[in-house]
Amino acid sequence: MEHDPPSPSDAEAFEQGREPLLVTRLEAHARRAAAGTRRASGGFAHPYAVVVLLTAGRSRVDHAGALELRPGDVHVIPPGDAHSSARFEGAQGWGIAFWPEQSGHSLRLFSQVRGGCHPVLRLPPAGRRRLERWLRALEDEAARREEGRDEALAALLRLVLLELVRASAATLHPGTEASSLARRALAFVEGSALRPLSLSDVARAVGRTPAHVATVVRSETGRTVGEWILAQRMAEARRRLRATDGSVEGIAGHVGYADVTHFIRQFRRVHGRTPAQWRRAQGHPQAGARRP
């Protein structure tokens, strides 16, 4: 089955959180920066995770050092990690981008990479065949608009990530460089964003001054610490809006907002619509929401 590259509208829907993931063929189109991705000093940094499987050709990319991917390599890019645009030579394979709320317990894989482990996995032949099978199925399912699509995509993504988690136990080793300050700061944000959290809290956790942390994170990722906190909170809010019947007020509290009006205002600023409107657009009406 032939697939066209994702259209700009598909990429925009993903960037706005209306699509849970985006699947691309490396050979189908030149890699382009998605809407909303910002240029950082080290390249690109985005609030979603990316996994690239190379099945043919070669790819060069800068990500915690210069990398050269060959057939069978899997490149794991955690949310917030700065990297260059890939330079492909006859490359074939897949790239998938997905929001952190889709990862479940498999976020451990991305935390290991952010903590300094090498970002490239090499799967054994059997694992690579399974991974290609799951990616083809993801690609086919994403192209359809049938009942149960989101559930099928979530199940297939879990299979992809499980394959990578299993491979990481044998192939994911510490890199040659220590984890950067920005990586450590984002790891703390990732684990703490759903409670009251400030730049000062993050700086205290990594043992630096707030001004220094703010400068380094912005320089390396193109986003402020506050924007990364917001991204984590919005990811969890989307997950709860999509997968639960919780009220908007309840979800606001779960994602770190004591004031539901402030939560609604922040959500609308990011997504262009209120939480209740966003939820209805996903096809999940929720009778318990008492506010727009």
Image (cartoon, grey):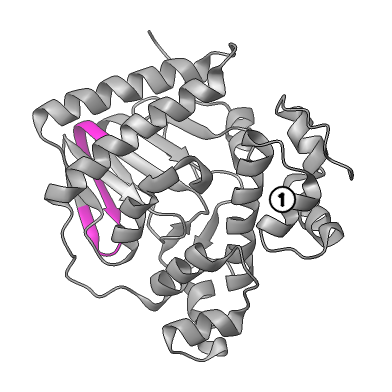
Vertical arrangement, residue 237 with respect to residue 127, above or below: below
Q: What type of secondary structure mainly makes up the magenta span?
A: strand
From this view, report whether residue 230 is shown above or below residue 26.
below
Judge left or right: residue 65 versus residue 254.
left
Q: Quadrant of the C terminus?
A: top right
Could you classify mark 1 by the number of other residues whose Cα lies within 10 Å: few (under 14), some (14-19), or many (20 or more)? many
The magenta-colored residue range is 53-67
Would residue 41 be visible to someone looking at this image? no
Q: Nearer the viewer, residue 123 or 95?
A: 123
Tag 1: residue type?
Answer: Ile
The image position of residue 157, as x and y in percent, is: 40, 31
In this orientation, which residue lies closer to the viewer: 138 or 217? 138
Residue 208: x and y, percent? 46, 90
Residue located at (59% from left, 36% from top): 14
Quarter of the figure with residue 181: bottom left
Q: Is residue 35 above or below residue 184?
A: above
Q: Position of residue 92 (x, y in %)?
A: 27, 28
User: In the displayed structure, would residue 203 be above or below residue 120?
Assistant: below
The residue under the point 56% across, 87% down is 210
Residue 124 located left or right of residue 259: left
Secondary structure beneath dot 1 equals helix
Query: Quadrant location of residue 253?
Result: bottom right
Is residue 122 in view?
yes
* Number of on-image labels: 1
Instruction: Find the residue positioned furthest to the top.
Output: 1
Q: Is residue 62 left or right of residue 292?
A: left
64 in magenta: yes
Task: Provide residue 139's location: percent of width, then percent of height.
Answer: 42, 21
